Amino acid sequence: MISPQLLTLLSDFGLSDIYVGVMKGVIARINPEMRVIDLTHQIPPQNIAAARFCLMSACPYFPDGTVHMAVVDPGVGSTRRAVAVEFAHGFLVAPDNGIISGVLSQSRAIRAVELTNPQYWRVPNPSYTFHGRDIFAPCAAHLASGVPIKNLGREIDIDSLVELNLPKCCYITTGAVGCIQYIDIFGNLITNIPGSYVEGKTWHIVVGNLKIKGGATYNSVPIDSAIALVGSEGWVEIAINRGNAQQQLNIQLAQTVEVGAG
């Protein structure tokens, strides 16, 4: 694999405080030439599911060898592990709390390590509340500067990495059953049912007491009407034409949905 030279950042730190800037300062002290791209720092606070989806959706658009650092970490300072994972097209650096499970569901993991080597931390005694600054950012910067992943800590079993506890998509005789895996800023309700399942079909989606007809675009229905369609990332989603589906339909993350024919 080509030595990685690109680093992406994702967090729930927002932009009002100095947290993101400080992490970038730590990265710059290690490698002033590092190319850093912000995926987003507007993940809803402590929302691991949202971070999982955004990271999974973003990774395929980057060159091979990119290091992706994601810090949404409600368990910071606890016994949860800090990890780095090498997968087929790059690297992940994150808390082991399910945030990387979406990427790993789509890309083969090669090896994983726990970030136990303080040589690559910012300081030997990191803060209990800001591992993004003291562990994740420096380890990611070293990794993206060419330090072998094995140097960052002890190797761990790939199968031991935490998987986020969301209902999986499954197929039944009448269709497919899944859940809402992400709600975007527009209130669109993105399921974990692949769009390929409904390709070429006449279909609908059922959620709670609602039955919503499948269509091609948001304006396939009148303004303020509900529509089910395949979104830009390839998942079945529920939307309101020029409205907010989450607010208007009162549907929540992880809620069960079913796709059927007709």
Image (cartoon, rainbow, N blue to C red):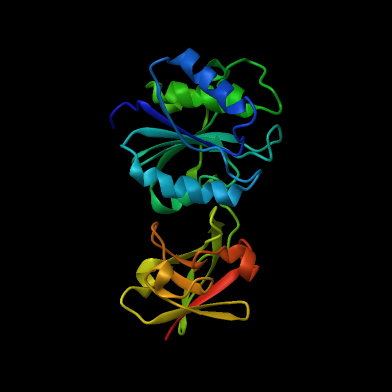
At x 58% / y 17%, what residue is drawn? 122
In the displayed structure, 35 sits above or below 260; it is: above
x and y percentages locating residue 252 in the rendered image:
64, 63
In the displayed structure, 261 sits above or below 31; it is: below
Q: Residue furthest left?
A: 2
Query: Between 65 and 151, which is closer to the camera in this rendering?
Result: 65
x and y percentages locating residue 225 in the rendered image:
52, 74
In the displayed structure, 52 sits above or below 192; it is: above
x and y percentages locating residue 13 in the rendered image:
62, 35
Which quarter shows the N terminus?
top left
At x 38% / y 58%, what residue is drawn? 232
At x 58% / y 21%, what residue is drawn? 22
In the displayed structure, 120 sits above or below 249; it is: above
Query: Between 191 and 227, which is closer to the camera in this rendering?
Result: 227
At x 53% / y 25%, what residue is drawn? 137
x and y percentages locating residue 260 in the rendered image:
46, 81
Residue 113 at least partly seen = yes
Query: Between 158 and 204, which is closer to the camera in this rendering?
Result: 204
How many labels were placed on the picture? Answer: 0
> Residue 74 is drawn in which quadrant?
top right
Residue 251 at least partly seen = no
Which quarter shows the C terminus?
bottom left
> Residue 99 is drawn in which quadrant?
top right
